[in-house]
């Protein structure tokens, strides 16, 4: 895997690039090259045996706004969730129930309380991510531009809500 070859092949011409090779150093080098090339969002698997090497990589990745994960810690997180909330595993593996993310970009909904959102009776919002912080949602929580809503609901309802909240300054129909 060579960055120049991937560029030539058009692999870096994407909005999101996920690098999950087993060798952390390869993922790291390609992630830096992808970000330099201009890929907006880069995620990589960062599994390495050397904690000092991992820490150096993490510092550099954070500086470049590159996301990373460890398969071990991800697996532990899923297992912890399955133990604490048995239905979470079914949620993660089921095609009937899914978790979605919607970002608020429609300024007409800035300041709107969650309880006033269209389709609110048909979805469950589990968290709001605001400026990299998790917020527990309540009916009176007011939305801010850029908020990310983590929610579950039917694909159809989520698609309608996404259309409303992602439209630039337009009212739902």
Image (cartoon, rainbow, N blue to C red):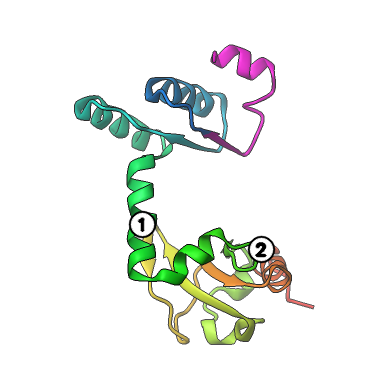
Q: Horizontal placement of 128 versus 94: left or right?
A: left
Q: Which mark is residue 108?
A: none
Is tag 2's residue or tag 1's residue first in the polypeptide sequence?
Answer: 1
Residue 105, quarter of the rendered image: bottom right
Q: Which mark is residue 79?
A: 1
Is residue 164 or residue 5 the one in the foreground?
5
Q: Which quarter shows the N terminus?
A: top right
**Residue at point 80%, 78% (across, down):** 173
Check the image and report above or below for 131 versus 50: below
Q: Is residue 133 visible?
A: yes
Q: Which mark is residue 166?
A: 2
Is residue 111 or residue 133 the one in the foreground?
133
Tell me residue 59's x, y (percent). 28, 33
**Residue at point 52%, 60% (across, down):** 92
**Residue at point 62%, 13% (across, down):** 5
Q: Write the start and end of the magenta stretch as one range.
A: 1-18
Q: Is residue 10 magenta?
A: yes
Disc 2 secondary structure class = helix
Tell me residue 128's x, y (percent). 45, 68
């Amino acid at each position: 895997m060579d960055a120049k070859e991937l560029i030539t092949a058009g692999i870096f011409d994407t909005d999101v690039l996920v690098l999950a090779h087993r060798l952390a150093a390869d993922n790291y080098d390609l992630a830096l090259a992808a970000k330099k090339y201009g890929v907006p969002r880069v995620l990589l698997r960062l599994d390495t045996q050397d904690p000092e090497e991992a820490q150096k990589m993490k510092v550099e990745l954070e500086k470049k706004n590159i996301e990373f994960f460890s398969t071990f810690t991800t697996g532990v997180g899923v297992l912890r969730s399955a133990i604490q909330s048995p239905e979470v595993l079914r949620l993660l593996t089921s095609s009937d129930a899914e978790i979605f993310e919607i970002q608020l970009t429609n300024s007409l909904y800035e300041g709107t309380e969650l309880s006033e959102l269209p389709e609110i009776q048909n979805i469950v919002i589990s968290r709001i991510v605001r400026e990299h912080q998790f917020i527990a949602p309540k009916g009176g929580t007011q939305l801010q531009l850029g908020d990310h809503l983590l929610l579950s609901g039917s694909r159809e309802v989520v698609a309608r809500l996404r259309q409303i909240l992602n439209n630039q300054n337009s009212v739902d129909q």
